[in-house]
Image: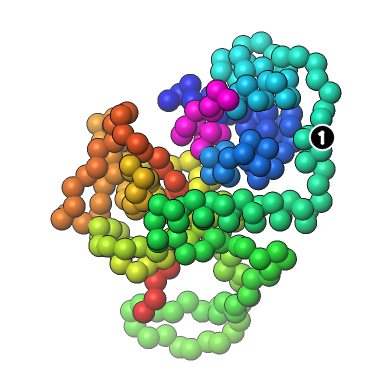
Amino acid sequence: MQTKIQLGVRHRQIRESVLQMSVADYAKQMQVKVPTVYSWESGRTSVPQDVLAKLENRYGISSGWLLTGAGSPKSIATEPDSNTTQASKSALERLEEQVHAIRSVIAELKAHSPLVVAPARLSKGARGTRIPMLSLGVSAGQPTASDDTIEREIDLADMLLEHPESTYFIRVVGDSMTDAGISDGDTLIVDCAVQPRSGQIVIAKVYGELTVKRYIKAEGRPVLRAENRRYKDIAITAEMDFTIVGVVRSCIKKF
């Protein structure tokens, strides 16, 4: 696991410092989805051999250095080709590519589950709605005096989305997470750019099926745990077809 993490760190260093590409640009060049790049760079999955070969043949990046950290990152002297000009694209072009990438992510997830409802941001140039925030908090105990003074206006997207280009919404079906406050019909905000840690609630894909569970390390082994005593733990083994798609950051409820 530590080796994959170190490979991911070096891989990100090459993308940002040498190739100077955004995640969306890089994913397009490698013909993969944006979450796949984040998964490589976080160390959740290893960078495939064909990608290492493409980096070496196209950009002169040493696969030996990526794998071991020994030697120089550049294996051969290469002239920048037309692919490296992606870094100089305008902000508008980059935004269009990010929109295309996140739509592709949603399309891929829909193929495995009908629960994905919408990405965080889709329309080019769209601006969020700013909503007044009253300066006085509401009491959950004794009533307090009303105060309609507006402290500031907030944009829900700015407040809820840390990585908009890698965030999507997914609707919950079932009651396995009710003790965590997640109920059937709730909408989750999921960030696939976050490195999952033990104790966090995640969206995982197990044998092609999406599920929401708490990711924990039990006696050093990863487990997906429901927040409902009626459901058993799912122990994760090396032989399983298992991927953590993203970390749940917020839950949206309707009353």
Q: Residue at x 39, y 71 (%)?
A: 253
The colour scheme used here is rainbow
Q: Residue at x 40, y 40 (%)?
A: 243
Residue 29 percent coordinates (x, y)? 68, 37
Quadrant, the N terminus: top left
Q: Which of 225/144 is in front?
A: 225
Q: Residue at x 62, y 39 (%)?
A: 31
Residues in magenta, as a range: 38-50
Above or below, 151 against 81 in this view is below
Residue 48 is a magenta residue: yes
Q: Is residue 163 visible?
A: no
What element does badge 1 sit on? helix
* Crowd class of label 1 (few under 14; some 14 to 19; many from 20; radius 10 Å): few
Residue 231 percent coordinates (x, y)? 18, 52
Residue 4 is a magenta residue: no
Quadrant, the C terminus: bottom left
Above or below, 200 against 188 in this view is above
- In this rendering, position of residue 100 left or right of residue 20: left
Residue 77 percent coordinates (x, y)? 80, 16
Q: Which of 177/134 is in front?
A: 177
Above or below, 233 against 44 in this view is below
Residue 187 sits in which quadrant? bottom left
The three-letter code of the residue at mark 1 reads Ser
Q: Is residue 144 visible?
A: yes
- For label 1, the residue is 82
Q: Residue at x 45, y 88 (%)?
A: 145
Q: Which of 236/2 is in front?
A: 236
- In this rendering, position of residue 255 left or right of residue 48: left
Which residue is situated farthest in the left direction here?
230
Q: Which of 47/235 is in front?
A: 47
Residue 72 percent coordinates (x, y)? 70, 14
